[in-house]
Amino acid sequence: QVQLVESGGGLVQPGGSLRLSCTASEFTLDHHAIGWFREAPGKEREGISCIGVSDGYTWYTGSVKGRFSMSRDNYKNIVYLQMNGLKPEDTATYYCATDPRGYCRFEWDGSLTKDEYDHWGQGTHVIVSA
């Protein structure tokens, strides 16, 4: 059974760092674009970053650009989201998801599309608080 699992969430003070991991069972991630999404209480799920299959392409939404960084370890079949300079507004449940087309896709407003992702993890909670 295809399964994505996120890990690495937790409680961190403002300005701190966390590294989230996304692993998969029953398939390899290197043929998929991977998106990271987050959902804060009372808010819609938003796409915050994406990594494509080729050329190391990455995309970040404005609120995390310069603070978050995605990377792949194809040997370990893991995708990471390094989060630095965390802020209270980063508090949310974070999800990874796979897009079988292999490239990041966007809505007309430039936001990361959610509809084309075929597998989602269960989420990992990130709380940024003093």
Image (cartoon, helix red, strand yellow):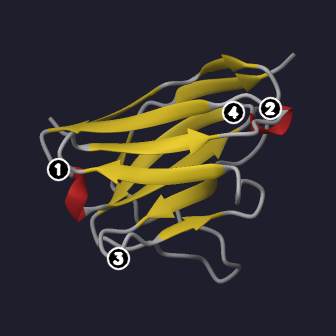
Helix or strand or loop: what does disc 1 sit on? loop
Q: How crowded is mark 3: few (under 14 residues within 10 Å), some or many (20 or more)?
A: few
Q: Which of marks 2 and 1 is nearer the N terminus?
A: 2
Q: Residue at horizontal 24%, vertical 52%?
A: 29
| SS category of the residue bearing label 4 | strand
Q: Residue at the bottom extreme?
A: 108
Please tell me which residue is depicted at 21% across the width and 63% down the height of the picture.
31
Q: Earlier in the sequence, mark 2 or mark 4?
A: 2
- Residue 76: give x, y in percent of width and height: 21, 39
Q: What element carries label 2?
A: loop
Q: Residue 92 carries which label?
A: 4
* Residue plotted at (76% across, 32% down): 41
Q: Which label sits on residue 55?
A: 3
Residue type at tag 2 = Gly
| Mark 4–mark 1 distance (CA, rounded to whole Å) | 27 Å
Q: In this view, does 91 lie above or below 100?
A: above
Badge 3 marks a residue whose secondary structure is: loop
Sort mark 4 into few (<14), some (14-19) or many (20+) by Cα contacts within 10 Å.
Answer: many
| Disc 2 versus disc 4: nearer the observer | 2
- Pair 4/3: label in front: 3
Label 2 to label 1: alpha-carbon separation? 33 Å
Q: Distance between the residues labelled 4 and 3?
A: 30 Å
Q: Mark 1 points at which residue?
A: 28
State the separation of the CA atoms marked 2 and 4.
Answer: 16 Å
- What residue do we see at 12% from left, 40% from top? 26
Label 2, residues with CA under 10 Å away: few <14, some 14-19, many ≥20: some
x, y percent for residue 118: 33, 55
